[in-house]
Structure formats: structure tokens, C-alpha cells
Amino acid sequence: MSETNQQGMNLHDLEPEIAQTLERIHDARASGPYEMCQEDVLRARLEPYLSREGVRNPRIEDLRRLAGGASKEQFVFTLTQDGSAPRRCVLRLEPVEGVAITSRQREFEAMGAVRDVVPVPEVLWVDADGAALGRPALIAAFVEGVTKPTATSSNITGFGTVIGETLREKLVVWFIEHLKAIHGTDIESPTLKSFQLPNADPKQAARWQVNWWTTVWHNDALRGIPVLGLAERWMRENLPETAELVLLHGDYRTGNYLFDEHSAEITAILDWEFTHIGDYHEDLAWTSLRPWSHIENGTLLASSLLPCDELFERYTSATGRTIDPKTLHFYQVFCLYKCSVICLGSGLRSAHEAHNHQDALMSWLTPAGYVFVNELIDVLDQGLQR
Amino acid sequence: MNPTIELRIKTMIRALTEIIVPAVDPRNALAQEQAGLLVGHLHALLLHGGREKAMCDGERAALKDLSNALVEVSDGGAITTAATSHLKALPNDVDTDTLSHAIEALVIDAGIDGSETFKRACDSLVIQHAREENLRSRVWFNAMGFDHDPDSLPDIESLFK
């Protein structure tokens, strides 16, 4: 493929931090199979690390590995230190590859930037380059809550979560309120020092995202998929202008927040690894993707919470931001493309290279990509007909 | 007589379900989840019934048809022409990965200097190919439980009629 598109657009116009992260993975591609972090090894590294970070006489107790975390190794432990009460902590540690390769430093900064406006686990420490813990890692406070009603079942990814009417009516109020708060975060906050503003021209926000995920696809795809090539071409030909830049969560949906089943309050918003600065339509398109939405009486409930039209109306009412159908459509294509890349590109590649501690999960998740491609074909075809 | 692959997979599922999974430390949530995943993978493999080669052959034949159709209608400037020539020059027995990447590259490069007529024809061919092939993949992996409407999909047998 050529390095420029029809407008001479630089296909490598990427957010610098993202470009560095992708470069790091590219360099690690030749490494051998990933060896998962053993609990005794982790404990032996954690205590001196926390001591250097200023924790007085740290002791790690009840260290346990958690399930889930499709792209990260996850542990929970109790930290005991002199002069403070014991506290439960969660550690997220990144393997060489997974469904997505992102930056722990950015995740740390994003959670810090929003901690006063939305519920997030308190971020405590980050070993951004893995110098202390062997791999890049983030430590946050443990938060109680569930990601889905305990009485329901769903696939391992959270696909097909069903939330009862009474519960969702309460959750949706918080869901929109928190989205409004995230989008209202000061994007020039010094806390967000690893984030750059896509403000060189009005299309840069969309272009950065397209270049990010097409680069991932071309780096990771073991086999080409013609319709993803068509989606790439269509996106490059239809980049929307962004009138207002906001902080985006990047993976805002049911399954990525914890809630209390009794109070129906959202206790923590999770998974900030895709956070970036861009167009608010992107989060709205992501939230309403069909694979993690539920259909009830023929109506698709975005994130299994509320009808899409109602989501957009309530978001507009809460924020004053209007929804442009054409821009929303662009981001629907983009989000479906991104999900397809995550499953059929990165997930499969990490299993192929044995670069993740959960290779069996990576190969299990790969076919989920066909569900996203199925949606992509329809949404893309609508765009081609215009 | 040799034990069939079907029998061997069934015995593995039984060993996992009745012996290994109950013995996994209940505090080790990841090990429990992984053991469950292996059972799921084995169930899906059982349904595939040794027809992976036929599935791959079908995928390859569909890509070959798409390649021929695109080469036939390709039209444009130097970049589109180069991508078309590359695709056309691939040997008949080229591996499926190389073939698929070459087709995808042509589809993308058509956006640089492909003629409007070619781009419209390409759009239509690629969408048609995607609808047919993606449906095959959804059917093949229906047992994984990701599809929104699993009951609407035909069974795996139908892919090989």
C-alpha cells in the first residue's frame, strides 16, 4: 500500500504516544512465548517496589490471581503498611500482546484526571515501563461491585448481558451523568501529560483514530479481510470534522462499570486503556454497538440500558451537544472496524505468537470478530449507498 | 481399530468435566475459567467434525473468485495498476494469507487513484463476498455463543452441500 491517500494525507499521522506504544509492540514481536508472572515472583518484586515508592514497611498478603482481564494479568492483594489500615488493591500487568496493546501510563493519567468527577478505582502506582515489576503494571484500589446482575448469564466477554427494567432505569441515570462528566473533563489538564490534542486540523481527531487501528490491523492480521480494506478506504474518504474535542473513555459500555445491585449505583468505571481525546460521537457510537446491547421487544437497548434514540436525546439534553447523524454513522463504522481488528487481528495474533497468558481465551474470542464484521457490512453498505 | 478424533475429543471433555474441573482450586478463578474454556473449545471442535480443510478450501475458492473478478474490472492510475498487477502475478497455488492480503491491498489502493467505475464495482464485489463468507464463519463458530441470533443460522452441514 502507498504511504499517502488520495489527498496526500499522511497515513502515519498518529498521536505520538500511540505511535510509540505500537512501535514497542512491533519490536517485541520476535520475542518467544510469554511466561506468565508467578505469584511468588510478583510478591518478591512488589514489596521492594512499594518500599521505594514510599510505602512504609509494605507487606503483601492474600495475593490472588483474578479471572477475566482479556488482555492483562490481574491480581488482587491486601497491602499492609506501618501507620495505615490494610487496603485491598488490584494490579493489572500487561503481557507482550493481547486483544489490545495500550499504555499503563495513559491509563494511570486518565483515571487520575477523572477521579473527582466520576467513580473510578483510586490509582495508586504505575510501573510504566515494567522496570520494577517485570512488565508494565498499574496498581489501583479494589472496588466492590458487579459488572452484570448476578442472576443472569452471559458469554465470557459480557456479550448478551440482560439487565432488568427496574435496575436499568436507575443505572441509566448514572450512566449518562458519568459520560457527561468524562466528556466535561479539562483536556488540557496537566494530569493528562501523555495525551496530545488532535488539533492540527478539524479532521485530525478522526484521522488519528483511523490511523491507529488500521496500523494495528496491518501489523497484526495473519490473513487479509477484503471488507476491512473497504472500510479503511471508506473511512479515509469520509473523515468527519470535529467541532469540539473532549476526553473519551474509549470503551464506555455495560461490562466496563461496576455497580451495587442493591442501590443500583455505579461504584466504579473501569478499563480506561482506550481513553483519548476526540469526538464525543465516538463514545456514543461505541456505547450503542449491537454486540453488547440487548434487543427487547424488537428494540435495541444501547449497552442493554436504553433505546439508542433515547440515549442520544438524553445525552443532548444533559450536555447541550447535538448529534450529527453523518458523524455518528462514521464512528459506527469506525467502532465496528476497531472491534473487528481487536478480535480478528490482535487477539488471533497474540494466540499465534503465544504472547499472552490466556492464549485459549484469545483464540476463543477471535470468532467474536465475525459478529462485529456482520454489523460492519450493513453499516458500511449504508455509507456506500449515499 | 483406531479411536476416532470424535471419540478422543469426547473422552477429553468427560475427563475435564468429571475429573479435572472439580479438582481445580475454587480460589483460582483464572484456572477455573480456563478449564471451562477448554471444554467449550472441545465442544466446538466436535461440531467441526474434521471438516476444517473443507472450510479452508471454501474460503480460498471464494477469495480466488473475488480476486479474478476484481482483476477483470480494475481500472485506475499507477497505484491501482501496480496493486492489480501484484494480485494478478500471484501463482495459482499461492497461500491463502498472501492472496487475501493482496486483495485487501488492492481494495485500499483503489481509494488513491482507482477510477470511480472501478471503485463502485469493487464496493459491490467486496460487500457480496463479505456477506457470503462472514455468514459461513458465523455458522462455523456459532457454538462459541457470540451471535445475536444463533437460531437463525443454518447448521454446519449446510456449508458443505
Image (spheres, coloured by chain):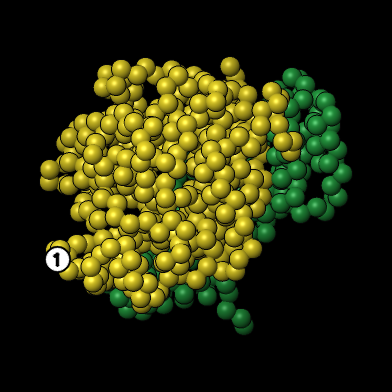
Chain colours: A yellow, B green
**Mark count:** 1
Q: Is residue A312 above or below residue B90?
A: above
Q: Position of residue A7 (x, y in %)?
A: 69, 23
- Label 1 crowd (10 A; few <14 / some 14-19 / many >=20): few
Residue B82 is drawn in which quadrant? top right
Residue A161, visible in the rendered structure: no
Q: Amino acid at mark 1?
A: Gly
Q: Is residue A375 above or below residue A313?
A: below
Q: Is residue A135 above or below residue B120?
A: below
Residue at image location 30% in from the left, 75% down from the top: B25
Q: Position of residue A257 (x, y in %)?
A: 28, 45
Residue at image location 28% in from the left, 63% down from the top: A54
Residue A80 is left or right of residue A252, and the answer is left
Residue at image location 80% in from the left, 37% down from the top: B83
Residue at image location 30% in from the left, 17% down from the top: A320
Residue A383 is drawn in which quadrant? top right
Instruction: State the residue in front, B94 or B108.
Output: B108
Instruction: State the residue in front, A276 or B1.
Output: A276
Q: Position of residue A185 (x, y in %)?
A: 32, 32
Q: Where's the N terminus of chain B, which quadrant?
A: bottom right
Q: Which type of secondary structure does the marked residue at label 1 adopt?
A: loop
- Chain name for mark 1: A
Q: Position of residue B45 (x, y in %)?
A: 53, 63
In the current view of this chain or complex, which residue is farthest to the bottom? B1
Residue under pointer 1: A83
Instruction: State the residue in front, A301 or B51.
Output: A301
Residue B156 is left or right of residue A123, and the answer is right
Residue A215, visible in the rendered structure: yes
Residue B97 is left or right of residue A262, and the answer is right
